């Protein structure tokens, strides 16, 4: 039986766990907004047309800041289309997802939904087909109290107080040739710096995110970050990171996806710190990991069809991945990687929330339910508080596929006010792994509980036919003797151990 020993010590920390680490992402894509969060005819709909059953699940997910409205969508979006009387709003072609956007939901409506789910808005501006002028006009509309044309326009649209949005994304994936308004690093870096300077002339204390690479596989990865920050370092606060993982017939590599995320984060921070040294700056740029998840991207690429000129559907079913137990274990492992880098990852957004590669699914006129990936996110978001610890691990390894030999157990831990949480993934596909945890260095008292995700069928799912096939399970093997916890982790499992 494989074994792993973990030592926790409050003297060895990574950094504070910032609440934005558990953010989400809502894009006007497929059935995310329409039929997902917004369905006025649904029996649970509130006065604004938002499904209350979905609101309850998002609150249970415990999501902090939510990035909106895209994503690829934002690079062709005119924010003005989403304000004013709903019946007068234009229908537009969405080139990103070959759909028709009705603009029934815009900034005001989305803020109503954010208030209902108790989350913060992280707003993206269009630097693809638009630019600096439109960004500062949106900022004036959203954040200036009164007395200007755009602030008064907001007030006439029913919002007297400002939206007070703090965090703004300066475009989306501008390195991607699929992106409307795609730019090279030089041109984007100059545009991001110019836009950031202009926005700060209105509100100096904004938190601004420059676009990093849209993925580590991009040929310009690393060099893109360096070039963009050479232009924008003094003007922005964060550089974005995007990463998606999928099982491509290689479960060993898939279960070791956190190794890749670790490397991705380290590379981005190295590029940022290189620019910091070159500029002799005292300022540090951190990461907004504002898109991450498990996504069958290769299947999506195969399934894309050539649309007819007249074929622009409203809210088509797109990217509706049905997640397995293995997917949930990997999501739990990616959360562990984010916690392991809590010193440099200031914000992170699981992409996305509802229907579109989301932990929540809905059926029009029907139920909403939790996918398998819901559980590791909701539990980690609830338990991971205070400070992330450097976990000292020793023990057996396992074949990590293309990543080579990797620790059989991946782990992260947090501590706050005498309470602690330890998050564990057993990457072994057939063997139970015994884990011992030394708590002497953190002084955590109280009861110990362990719950997680595992199943004899690693491809089991929750779907419309069986919405509760997979759920959280209590691990009854957990024991505490003095300052030592012992637990047995089933194969291909994610587990959270809470102390106190």
Image (cartoon, rainbow, N blue to C red):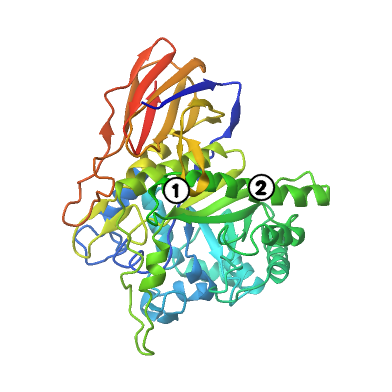
Element carrying mark 1: helix
- On the image, numbered disc 2 is attached to which residue? 269
331 in relation to 389, above or below: below
Can you name the residue that lies furthest to the left here?
465
Task: Give 173 or 2, whichever is nearer the viewer.
Answer: 2
| Pointer 1 local density, CA inside 10 Å: few below 14, some 14–19, many at least 20 | many
Q: Residue 191 in the image: x percent, y percent?
A: 70, 69
Q: Position of residue 124 (x, y in %)?
A: 54, 63
Farthest residue, direction bottom: 309
Residue to which mark 1 is pinned: 253
Residue 302 lies, with reference to residue 203, above or below; the image says: below
Q: Nearer the viewer, residue 47 or 167?
A: 167
Q: Quadrant of residue 222?
A: bottom right
- The kind of secondary structure element at disc 2 is helix
Residue 94: name its quadrant.
bottom left
Image quarter hosting the C terminus: top left
Upstream in sequence: badge 1 or badge 2:
1
């Amino acid at each position: 039986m494989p074994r792993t020993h973990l030592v926790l010590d409050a003297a060895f920390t990574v950094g504070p766990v910032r609440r934005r680490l558990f953010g989400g992402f809502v894009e006007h894509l497929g059935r995310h907004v329409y039929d997902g969060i917004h369905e006025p005819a649904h029996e649970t709909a509130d006065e604004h047309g938002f499904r209350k059953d979905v609101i309850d699940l998002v609150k249970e997910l415990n999501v902090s800041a939510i990035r909106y409205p895209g994503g690829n969508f934002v690079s062709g979006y005119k924010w003005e289309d989403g304000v004013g009387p709903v019946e007068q709003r234009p229908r537009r072609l969405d080139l990103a997802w070959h759909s028709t956007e009705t603009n029934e939901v815009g900034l005001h409506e989305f803020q109503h939904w954010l208030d209902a789910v108790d989350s913060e808005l992280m707003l993206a501006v269009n630097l693809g087909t638009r630019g600096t002028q439109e960004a500062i006009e949106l900022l004036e509309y959203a954040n200036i109290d009164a007395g200007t044309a755009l602030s008064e326009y907001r007030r006439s649209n029913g919002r007297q107080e400002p939206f007070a949005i703090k965090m703004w994304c300066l475009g989306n994936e501008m390195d991607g040739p699929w992106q409307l308004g795609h730019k090279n690093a030089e041109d984007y870096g100059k545009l991001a710096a110019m836009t950031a300077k202009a926005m700060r002339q209105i509100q100096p204390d904004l938190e601004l995110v420059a676009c990093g690479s849209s993925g580590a596989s991009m040929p310009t990865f690393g060099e893109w970050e360096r070039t963009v920050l050479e232009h924008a370092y003094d003007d922005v606060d964060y550089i974005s990171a995007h990463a998606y993982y999928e099982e491509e017939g290689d479960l060993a590599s898939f279960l070791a996806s956190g190794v890749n995320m670790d490397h991705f984060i380290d590379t981005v921070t190295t590029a940022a710190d290189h620019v910091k040294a070159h500029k002799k700056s005292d300022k540090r740029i951190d990461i907004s990991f504002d898109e991450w998840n498990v996504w069958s991207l290769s299947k999506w690429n195969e399934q894309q069809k050539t649309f007819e000129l007249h074929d622009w559907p409203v809210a088509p079913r797109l990217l509706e991945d049905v997640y397995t137990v293995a997917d949930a274990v990997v999501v739990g492992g990616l959360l562990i990687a984010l916690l392991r880098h809590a010193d440099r990852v200031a914000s992170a957004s699981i992409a996305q929330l509802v229907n579109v590669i989301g932990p929540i699914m809905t059926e029009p006129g029907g139920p909403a339910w939790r996918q398998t990936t819901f559980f590791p996110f909701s539990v980690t978001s609830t338990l991971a508080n205070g400070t992330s610890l450097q976990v000292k691990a020793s023990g057996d390894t396992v074949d990590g596929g293309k990543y080579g030999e990797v620790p059989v157990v991946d782990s992260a831990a947090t501590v706050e006010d005498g309470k602690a949480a330890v998050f564990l993934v057993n990457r072994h596909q057939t063997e139970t792994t015994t884990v011992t945890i030394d708590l002497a260095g953190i002084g955590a008292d109280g009861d110990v509980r362990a719950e997680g995700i595992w199943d004899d069928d690693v491809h089991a799912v929750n779907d419309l036919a069986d919405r509760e096939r997979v759920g959280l399970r209590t691990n009854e093997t957990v024991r505490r003797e003095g300052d030592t916890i012992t637990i047995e982790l089933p194969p291909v499992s994610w587990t959270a151990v809470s102390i106190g």
